[in-house]
Amino acid sequence: MKKIIFLILLIFFCNCLLAQDTTTTKVKRKNAVKGIITYFPVLFNSIISLGYERYITSNSSLCLTLKGYYFLNDGGERYSYSIIPNYNYYFSSKYKFINNICLNPCLIYTYASSGGDDYQYITNNYGLGFTIGKRIYISHKKRWFFDIGFGTAYFNKIYKFYEERIVDEKWNPVTMHYDIMVTTITSHNPTYPWYPRFIFLLGYKF
C-alpha cells in the first residue's frame, strides 16, 4: 500500500518539476491552491479538502488533493482520508459556456474506518475517477475562482479489519422465552463499488 502511494506521488511531483522549464513563457500564473472546510453541527458532519495545482500549459495542469471526512451519530462514527493526484484539461473557446470547462481524470487512495453498535470495519480503497466541471472566475484579474463539477469513481475496496454481530431471537416453547443467538462475522471479501464524485472548491491562482 505504502509503495503504491509513494509511486503515485513520485510520478506526480516529477511531472511537476519537468513542466517548470518547458512552460515558463506560456503560463503567467503557474500555481493555484484550492479547498473547502465545512461543518454541519446538526449532522455532526465535517469535510476538509485542500489541493495544490501546477499548470504545465495554459490549458492543462496537475493537481494533488488531500481530503478528510468525519461523521458522528448515536450508533458510532465514520471517518476517512484520501490522497487524490489528478490531471486537469481546460477547454478554451470564444463561447463562454464552453470556456473553462474542465475534464478531470484522477487516481484515488482512501483509508476509511466505520463503526457502530453491531459492526466495525477498516478499509483500504484504491480507485479511478473521472469528473467534468467548470472553473468560474469571481475576480477581475482571474485570481479567485470556484471549481464545480460532478462525476464518478470506481474502487477496489479491501477490508483490513471486519467485525459484524448478528443478533437473532427465537422463541423457545419449553422455557417460554426468547433465546438470543449472537453470530460474529470477522471477514469480508473485497468489493468493487461505484461512487459519485462532487466538486465544489474555492481557489486562488498565482
Image: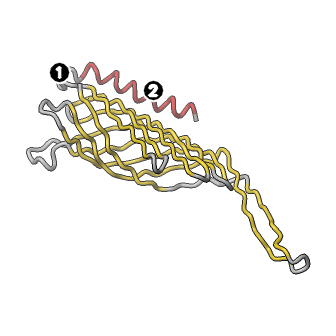
Q: Residue furthest left?
A: 94
Residue to which mark 1 is pinned:
25
Q: Amino acid at mark 2?
A: Leu
- Residue 139: give x, y in percent of width and height: 16, 34
Residue under the image location 41 percent in, 47 percent down: 129
Residue under the image location 45 percent in, 26 percent down: 10
- For the C terminus, the quadrant is top left
Asked if marks 1 and 2 touch (Cβ < 8 Å), the reply is no
Structural distance between the alpha carbons of marks 1 and 2: 25 Å
Q: Amino acid at mark 1?
A: Thr
Query: Looking at the picture, does residue 72 appear above or below residue 22?
Result: below
Classify mark 1: helix, strand or loop.
loop
Q: Is residue 101 left or right of residue 7?
A: left
Query: Looking at the picture, does residue 121 appear above or below residue 61?
Result: below
Q: Quadrant of residue 136?
A: top left
Residue under the image location 58 percent in, 36 percent down: 1
- Residue 194: give x, y in percent of width and height: 47, 56
Residue to which mark 2 is pinned:
10
Q: Nearer the viewer, residue 192 or 76?
A: 76
- Residue 165: give x, y in percent of width and height: 72, 58
Q: Which mark is residue 66?
A: none
Earlier-in-chain disc, 1 versus 2: 2
